[in-house]
Amino acid sequence: MDHKIIASIMTDISENIVWPIIHEICKDHNKKVVNPFSARIGSGARTYHTLKRQNGKKQHIVTYGQKMLEDKRDYNRAVQWLTGREIIEKDFFNGVATYENIVAHTILHEMAHALQVIMGDRTYNSVHNKAFYQWLKLLHNKCGHEVLNALINKSQKKKVSLDFKINEIEENNPTPIINARVGKIYQCYLNKQNALVKLTKINPKKFAIIVIDEKHKENGKSYSIPKHMLDKAPEEFIKNRIDLNVINDAPLDTNQIKILKKYKIELKKRTLVVEVKKKNRTTAIVEILSGNDGMIGQKWKIPLSNLKENN
């Protein structure tokens, strides 16, 4: 099976390329590596790091699941895994989520957990924390391209493909929209079904979108997606998924909310115009500009998600 061969390559790279780099990092931080390391192949989907007692001594063990590798062959499944989302959202490998990049990143992700544990930065209920991503970024900087090149070269020698399933790509990932416009409505394949989305920002390699589909379980959530995932939405599909009379009231991408700009909010069962005075990641201080005389000029602290475009 190809996936077993790929998992074997991943164990080899983990032990012979990344683990020595971890030793170097620990030395630079005056941290002693006490426990040995080994990587192994799992038959299921579970892919994880653990510090486990084996042969009477604790040992760092990373397991790469064959079914994980099989599941990631489908692009739309791959970008739902945390490792797939990390590439896009945190711009690892320039934000390009190819199968080979995802596999290489999976190695670095699991090995970063080993480094995180050695450094004492993993605590109960705090796994993918700020420290973890600092160590993951450091591993990418120190050996990311070496890991990727080793994966490609070893796979070529074993005559193993590192491509997505072609039929899945063609079916679910249409040709990129050339003249995409912010604020326009499109469709996108999310969680095994098409969703109606609003384009909120255009980046060099990705689109920022928000789901405005009343019949989709991801409704109201924001995503950063590769450009080829966006497609034109047929008129009938739009009519079936959202009330066109309230389409302009679709939730905003909170990253695009600007200071001193006017928005609408629903407050005390009334639609009011407000101006944003301050904001942080989740809330905004707004000044009320419309309503009765007693409300005009009042300042309220509200969730960013309550703001709507003032058209």
Image (spheres, rainbow, N blue to C red):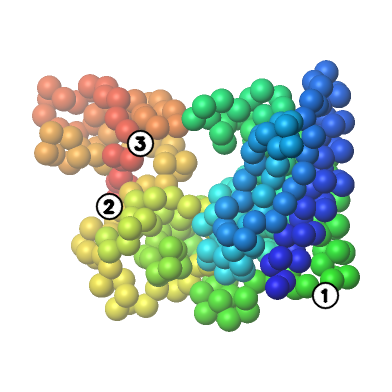
Asked whether residue 254 is in view, the answer is: yes
The residue drawn where x is 46% and y is 55% is: 209
Q: Nearer the viewer, residue 84 or 295?
A: 84
The residue drawn where x is 74% and y is 63% is: 6
Residue 216 on image: x %, y %: 32, 62
Name the image quarter holding residue 158. bottom right
Q: Is residue 223 left or right of residue 20?
A: left
- Looking at the rendered structure, the kind of residue marked 1 is Lys
Q: Where, quadrant-wise, is the N terminus in this rendering?
A: bottom right
Quick check: 265 above or below 295?
A: below
CA–CA distance in space, label 1 to label 2: 53 Å
Neighbours of disc 1 within 10 Å: few (<14), some (14-19), many (20+) = few
Q: Earlier in the sequence, mark 3 or mark 1?
A: 1
Instruction: Report the disc number at residue 238.
Output: none
Q: Which residue is mark 3?
A: 304
- Looking at the rendered structure, the kind of residue marked 2 is Asp
Q: Which residue is mark 2?
A: 249
Neighbours of disc 3 within 10 Å: few (<14), some (14-19), many (20+) = many
Q: Between tags 2 and 3, which lies in front?
A: 3
Q: Is residue 141 left or right of residue 286?
A: right
Name the image quarter holding residue 49. top right
Residue 268 on image: x %, y %: 13, 34
Q: Which residue is mark 1?
A: 159
The number of callouts visible is 3
In the rendered structure, are the residues bearing label 1 and label 2 in contact, judged by CB atoms less than 8 Å apart? no
CA–CA distance in space, label 2 to label 3: 14 Å
Q: Nearer the viewer, residue 84 or 34?
A: 34
SS category of the residue bearing label 2: helix
In the rendered structure, are the residues bearing label 3 and label 1 in contact, judged by CB atoms less than 8 Å apart? no
SS category of the residue bearing label 1: loop
Residue 4 on image: x %, y %: 71, 65
